[in-house]
Image (spheres, grey):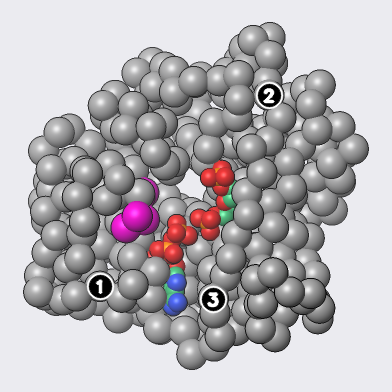
Amino acid sequence: MIVTLTPNPSIDRTIAVDRLEVGGVNRAHSVLVDPGGKGVNVSRALAANGVPTTAILPLGGPDGDLHSSLLDAGGLSHVAVGIGGNTRTNVAIVDPRGGTTKVNEPGPELSDVEVAALRAAVPRDAEWVVLCGSLPRGTDASLFTDLVATHPGQVVVDTSGAPLAAAVAATPYLVKPNREELEELVGRRLATLGDVRQACRELVAGGISVVVASLGADGALLTTADGAWLAKAPVANPLSTVGAGDCLLAGVLSALAEDLPASEALARGVAWGSAAVSLPGSQVPGPGDVARIGVVELEIDDALVLAD
Ligand SMILES: Nc1ncnc2c1ncn2[C@@H]1O[C@H](COP(=O)(O)OP(=O)(O)O)[C@@H](O)[C@H]1O
Ligand SMILES: O=P(O)(O)OC[C@H]1O[C@](O)(COP(=O)(O)O)[C@@H](O)[C@@H]1O
């Protein structure tokens, strides 16, 4: 069973406009509301593809009730730890010409009792534990590093900034940074694929078994002690990149949980990530969406300059 922990979940509101004018009045032509947060998205993508999973998350206030009813409507297995604060809402504004602009709220502060309840909700017998997203106020990186150090399962981390640096120091089984997160982690700009490959090699040399670097339209690079693989799957009409990294991670984990080889895990992950990009909002792809995606496995060209 793959269990995800999302300490700072969100309701994701995706608003589509023809052209975003900063400082002007913008009229939306569609609005989507999804139950979000990185681990929630990983679990939603796994469940949509028939992989057993449970999402663990704190929920509270009227927006926590809304999140909970969205999860129930989608039939996702989850454990909601009740909190006193109100669950946050994150907004993504999608402009077909200008890309996606995101505004993420900080979210409610958790009390020590609520943090303890969240930790206690992670089952000891989960084979995979996926620690995802930002940390809410009232918590520190020990929420992730303690689980990395003590949980008997394979622990996976997808977070950013200081919590990612702390988690990496505790050497989880797998990490999934995007290029920006990897640059912040290693403290230098990664302009080419060779730069990214070198950074991933350093993480593997430090004891992490699998590093999946997501590279947007350039695909993803998976690195282990045995080598590195690159795959991409172009999408003609990208609708929303929100949650694409979460779907990539879900695809990789579903394959690793089946003991498939690294290159097959990467190909599946990239197919799920690209399928997510071809759907609006933070909707997750099912098998039909994934089947429409053609993945190309590529020779690694270290000189390749990555798209901005
Ligand atoms: N514009 C795009 N075209 C095709 N695939 C994309 C595009 N953007 C993202 N993807 C796919 O989704 C995956 C995750 O996207 P990325 O933006 O790198 O992650 P994150 O959401 O974590 O920032 C990529 O590795 C790629 O497979
Ligand atoms: O916890 P964070 O870092 O604020 O991220 C939360 C957001 O991440 C998401 O999982 C989307 O992921 P991406 O931003 O990587 O596409 C949303 O569901 C959620 O709004």
Please give the range of residues in magenta: 176-180
**Mark 3 is on which residue type?**
Gly
**Which residue corresponds to mark 3?**
99
**Mark 1 is on which residue type?**
Leu
Secondary element type, mark 1: loop
**Which residue corresponds to mark 2?**
109
Residue furthest top in the image: 113
Question: Mark 1 and 3 residues: CB-CB less than 8 Å, in contact?
Answer: no
Provide residue 277's location: percent of width, then percent of height.
54, 73
Secondary element type, mark 2: loop
**Which residue corresponds to mark 1?**
306
| In this picture, residue 35 sits left or right of residue 190 | right
Residue furthest front in the image: 23
Provide residue 81's location: percent of width, then percent of height.
73, 24
Question: Mark 3 and 2 residues: CB-CB less than 8 Å, in contact?
Answer: no
Disc count in the image? Answer: 3
| In this picture, residue 218 sits left or right of residue 189 | right
- Mark 3 or mark 2: which comes first in sequence? 3
Provide residue 37's location: percent of width, then percent of height.
62, 46
* Residue 115 lies in the magenta stretch: no
